[in-house]
Image (cartoon, coloured by chain):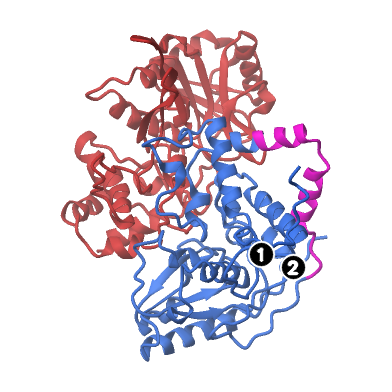
Amino acid sequence: MIQTIDISSYSAITDAIRSEARRILSDSTVSAVIGYTAGRRVGTTQPIVITTADEADKLLFSAGCLNDLVVYLTKAKKDVPKSGRIGIVVKGCDLKALVGLLGESQLKRENLYLIGIPCSGVLGSLLKPSAELTSETIASKCCECTDQLPLGCDFIPAVTPAPLPDLEKRYATEIARLEAMTPSERWEFWKEQFSKCIKCYACRQVCPFCFCEQCLCDRNRPQMVEQTPRPSGNTAWHLVRAMHLAGRCAGCGECERVCPMDIPLNLLNRKMAKELKELFNSEAGFEVRDTGPLTSYREDDDQSFIR
Amino acid sequence: MQKQITEANLRLLIDSLLLKGQRVVGPRQSGTMVLYEPLASASDLVTDELPRRSIKEAFFPVCEDLLEYRKEGQQIELKDIDPARFPETVLFGVRPCDAAAVPVLDAVFSWDYKDQFFLARRAKTTIIGLACTTADDACFCTAVGLSPNDPKGSDLLLTPMVGGGFLVESQSEKGEVFFSTWQDRFSEPDGTQTQALATPALQPLDLKKIKAWLDDHFEDRAWDSIAVRCVGCGACAFVCPACHCFDIVDEGSEKAGKRRKFWDACGFSKFTNHASGHNPRDLQPKRYRNRIMHKFKYYDDKFGQTLCTGCGRCIRVCPVGIDIAGVLEEIEKK
């Protein structure tokens, strides 16, 4: 049965974001605010960077606010003005990515002003942007969300998000299906998925953790990974991506959302997250950690895999 | 020449082509997407959805081999890929926004350098277009001077008729040849009305006015505000029917390998990166400016056409909601 998701709080959230952005820009708490604004097509939004209080009314929050804006804070995005303190609108999932970047010393907390969203969920895709938010159209990541209310922000609209109805945990279901396969069946599954890749690198470009200034996959002197969109180079790229994100990925799911070829990339990330939870009881959260599960060594780490 | 064909005869025609061993490519379901792919039977053909990627790959594939090399001692053996191996192909159900991009690509691939790979495939391909009766809010062919039944690029154009079947108009010699080869499947037009065409919402853009602004505003602060959100992926260029930038790379080992041609995109930070390390387009706004300039100024200056057919694919896939039609409207108002 298709259930409607209650997003009646989003207009109050929009009002609150606007007045807070106006306040922090007019009293010079921040030099810019990164948020969402309406797109030309009904239901769509796009990221916006505003620098004056007059522009605050351009901001909004809706079920179409899919982007993880944290990518605009990373050094990979050199074009976003980063002088002074920057305000940014974050959902719980986005904040976990930001916290990860704080842990990796990519950002300084005192340079940020966090506007948290009490989130009731967003659409899975903007291919049909005017769709109503339901148990069918909601993003897969929202179905397993435990962080509707971000913690540790500088401002959060005084709105309690309506609890999400019981939604099918799509990633858990799909991971269980893949785990039940034989290794060769699983290889076939991923081979087919990677064969669709056209190497547009949208997955890399939206990822807050893909901030390498020189991506290994772009190197051509010497070439490290086949650049062409062919099976070997595609597989190499997606495995490099998955492994480099293991223990870091915060689960914003942007890689999967933006893939124009519908490759279920977040499945790889979710599987890694599951392993890390099981092996090291480690998962992305709202608390800044200096070292990640794969960048620290402890005497009592499980070493049973060394044979 | 005008003819008409029933839905059943159209399917029979496709199956007859396939039986003859002819390669037929058309929109078909491929996993979660509709893509232009070889059809195995007429029942594969999907006529109610714009494929996720454009028809350009029928002539300009995502990646193709140009030559093979083998080296032993001082001996180097080079093996060319013979363009004559490309099979005769019929493209069925090509949307007018896709077909219209083909002559645009013809111009650039047969300009100073004749790209034998593109041209060999082009010569062996017949394009059967299909007029659109529905549009979504990203479609804007009518805003860039085309229409949902534009014959540009099609050898034959099918327009759905009221009550089923299609009115078929030939637009080229290839179309006439196709009519005469398969004349049994077609009948004379009986005057049945064609269905109402799609009506994309965006008003026609004044492309001359937009170009005039571009002519004078290579340097303008607008590029920063338009492109600040661009994250620098190649999704827009790769789904575009008209974008045609490519890179060439040798892959393999010192001993043996292949030279390959593959899609490139002006969004990438390495696009136009010089061997010296200098990049004239070092920031994203400069790269996005190139995208707009190439489509609506440079290409027009050189070939008198616009490098955009309003298919709306880039609008649908952009990770950060960049809407080229909205950008053009903004420029038009300046």
Q: Which residues are magenta?
A: A165-191
Where, by quadrant of the figure, is residue B47 drawn?
top right
Task: Pinpoint residue B149: horizontal percent, then vertical percent.
Answer: 45, 36
SS at circle 2: loop
- Magenta part, dominant SS: helix
Q: Is residue A179 magenta?
A: yes
Q: Is residue B9 above or below residue A1?
A: above
SS at circle 1: loop
Tag 1 subunit:
A
Horizontal arrangement in the rendering, residue A2 relative to residue B279 (left or right) = right
Q: Identify the image quadrant of the N terminus of chain A.
A: bottom right
Q: Mark 2 near mark 1, Cβ–Cβ under 8 Å?
A: yes
User: Badge 1 is on which residue?
Assistant: A132
Residue lying furthest front: A299
Task: Pinpoint residue A129: horizontal percent, then vertical percent.
Answer: 57, 59
Q: Is residue B191 above or below residue B285?
A: above
Q: Nearer the viewer, residue B280 or A55?
A: B280
Report the residue at 56% width, 51% height from top.
Answer: A244
User: The disc labelled 2 sits on which kind of residue?
Assistant: Thr
Report the residue at 51% width, 42% height from top.
Answer: B197
From the image, state the color of chain B.
red
